[in-house]
Amino acid sequence: MNTATSSAPSSAHSTNTATSAVLAEDKTVAIVSYLTLIGFIVALVIHGNNKTRLGAYHLRQSLGLIVCSLAMLPVGLVLGFIPVLGWLTGFAIWIGFIALWAVGLISALNGQQKPVPVLGEKFQAWFNKAFE
């Protein structure tokens, strides 16, 4: 009888350990996806081996931020030719992207599926079948 009671906590402990390991891997994909383009590619590889909802969610958010920032490059170049007002506008746009990136990263660090402000819901809609 003593053996039966001692195996139950061990089984529960191993289940908790396995669950926390899965959660840690989910968060790893989510976090790494925000760390530059190379981090996004690494997160894709990790996610390809073990697909998770949290990882897919943050890969879509990160991909949306990457696509939008690449789309803004020509706009930034044009604004660079406009003295002062163009420079300030371009600077404000990049600060906005950095803020969106930070919100996404913080959400990934907390293990939440929280979209980035303004564009996050659109990213999920645009890339809804990606990374599943």
Image (cartoon, helix red, strand yellow):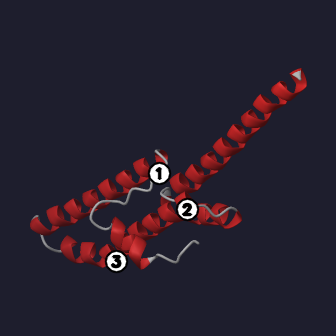
Q: Is residue 93 left or right of residue 34?
A: left
Q: Is residue 29 left or right of residue 106?
A: right
Nearer to me, 101 or 27:
27
Nearer to me, 98 or 118:
118
Q: Quadrant of residue 96?
A: bottom left
Distance in Å between CA atoms under marks 2 and 3: 27 Å
Residue at 66% over, 65% down:
45
The three-letter amino acid code for the residue at tag 3 is Ala
Nearer to me, 30 or 95:
30
Question: Relative to 98, is 74 above or below?
Answer: below
Identify the secondary structure beneath mark 1: helix
Quarter of the image that includes the N terminus:
top right
Q: Quadrant of residue 5?
A: top right
Mark 3 Cα-neighbour bin, 10 Å: few <14, some 14–19, many ≥20:
few
User: Label 1: which residue?
Assistant: 108
Question: Relative to 66, is 91 above or below?
Answer: above
Question: Relative to 31, is 47 above or below?
Answer: below
Q: Is residue 85 left or right of residue 57?
A: left
User: Label 2: which residue?
Assistant: 53
Residue at 23% over, 64% down:
93
Residue at 68% over, 61% down:
50
Q: Quadrant of residue 75?
A: bottom left
